[in-house]
Image (cartoon, rainbow, N blue to C red):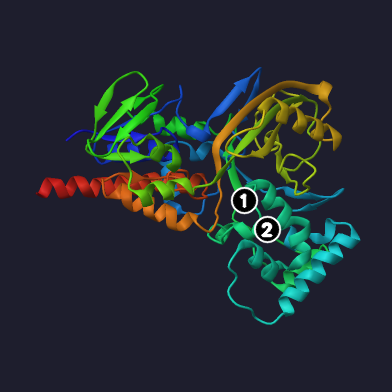
Amino acid sequence: MKPVLILGGGLTGLVAAERLAASRVSSRVVEKESEPGGACRTLGKDGYLFDLTGHLLHIGHEVTQSYLEDVGVWKELKTHERRAAIRVGNSVTPYPIQIHTHGLDPKTRRDCLLGFVRAWAAEAKSEPRSFEEWVLEQFGDGLAKHFFFPYNSKLYRAEPSELSLDWVGRYVPKPDLEEVINGALGLHQGETGYNAVFRYPCTGGIDCLPRAVAKRVENLELNRCVTAISLDESWVDFADGKRECFDDLVSTLSLPSLMDMIVDELPGDIAAARRVLRWVRVLNLALGVCGDAPTDQHWLYFPDPALPFYRVGFPSNHGSLAPEGAHTISVEVSLDPEGGDVDVLADQAMQALVGIGMVEEDQVQVRQLAVLDPAYVVFDHRRREAVAKLRKFLSSYGVIISGRWAEWKYSAMEDAILDGMTVARRLCGRAESRDTV
């Protein structure tokens, strides 16, 4: 049997390979970049360190902690209680807004509170069919107007009515009436949400995690870009001109990219399913700045449509990522899959940041741009059926898709680790079945 071929050396692919090796199943990981980690990489310049947007560890499973202990990372992580806020107009209030409206101006706070109470008191309606209907039912028109609709429209570049409910789950806290009223009066106690507590390296960036796993992956091949795949003939072509055959293929590449590289003629319904997949890119403007950070928050959300960014983080508030007497800023701007001059958009984001007093341009020492593509899956009403159809098609050829972008979902770093473990177990099961034949 040939070694399992794993496409993509991000966290999921690395963990899958490492766990396979622990079970004495051979594999190879091919990664197009010059270093492992995928979206969990850290870039350095002039003494500053920049993750590719915010990458924080939210650990909710003992098996994940055990794994991080095993690879030697857990002891290097520091625990932080989230400090995040939302800027609405000229007011800033803690996140999540639904239980922290006390920081808003009186009129906005009244809109949010009255809207929630009216929604709470309304007679039960039919099951909501969209994110728009769900927000209005759960939170009312005030919170919808001032945060949920403009923020998510900016992030996903879609109307709230276009979005399904497949993604909300654990990511949108749903308080009761007492919590909302306490929040309006500044009386809410305790943290809420899956990311209320997070861990981050005491020194250096988040790349310490994929690097630690990569040390245990014997066959990690960097600078190897996949250009074509034949499912019928079980081969993969690379940019270096080599063609390699496989028995077992795992893809952690984005689902659209994987489908676009398949050279075999696709059935009509499969080609149609690929075409409906939607996503946004994210422009990450990373800044190294002299002086203290303008806030002690870890990050801020910006629903205001007049501002180009949806989130601005201050990573040096939770990590040692800047020289002494300096700080880092991470600005995130959502983009359509194609179009837009990245340099112009970065300049606009920079000017907007200056305009709201978050940075003084003459204090910026380092400016670095990166584009994550894809960054966020758009959970529209056609996504679920399309992904299920594509997964079934690929599975019919024995291809396993795993990870956030391969499975076309929204998930965190812990999920990437767990996904890699799941893949390894599946493949070990395959190997055992073959051995018994």
Task: Residue 348: give x, y in percent of width and height.
Answer: 77, 31
Residue 350 quadrant: top right
- Position of residue 367 relative to residue 26, above or below, is above
The earlier-in-sequence mark between 2 and 1 is 2
**Residue that mark 1 sits on:** 197
- Position of residue 418 relative to residue 363, above or below, is below
Label 1 crowd bin: few (<14), some (14–19), many (20+), radius 10 Å? some
Query: For the residue labelled by badge 2, is the local secondary structure a helix, a strand or a loop?
Result: loop
Task: Residue 175: give x, y in percent of width and height.
Answer: 68, 67
**Foreground: 115 or 16?**
115
Task: Residue 307: give x, y in percent of width and height.
Answer: 78, 41
Q: From this viewpoint, which residue is outermost toward the right?
A: 106
- Distance from disc 2 to disc 1, alpha carbons, whole Å, reads 8 Å
Label 2 crowd bin: few (<14), some (14–19), many (20+), radius 10 Å? some
Q: Is residue 248 left or right of residue 416?
A: left
Residue 254 quadrant: top left
Q: Residue at x 64, y 34 (%)?
A: 283
Question: Could you tell me the amino acid type at mark 2?
Answer: Glu
Q: From this viewpoint, which residue is outermost toward the left?
A: 437
Q: Are marks 2 and 1 in contact (CB under 8 Å)?
A: yes
Task: Residue 88: give x, y in percent of width and height.
Answer: 81, 51
- Position of residue 76 relative to residue 109, above or below, is above
**Foreground: 157 or 333?**
157
Q: Is residue 228 visible?
A: yes
**Residue that mark 2 sits on:** 191
Q: Residue at x 85, y 50 (%)?
A: 89
Q: Is residue 58 left or right of residue 20?
A: right
Question: Could you tell me the amino acid type at mark 1?
Answer: Val
**Foreground: 309 or 163?**
163
- Position of residue 325 relative to residue 87, above or below, is above
Query: For the residue labelled by badge 1, is the local secondary structure a helix, a strand or a loop?
Result: strand
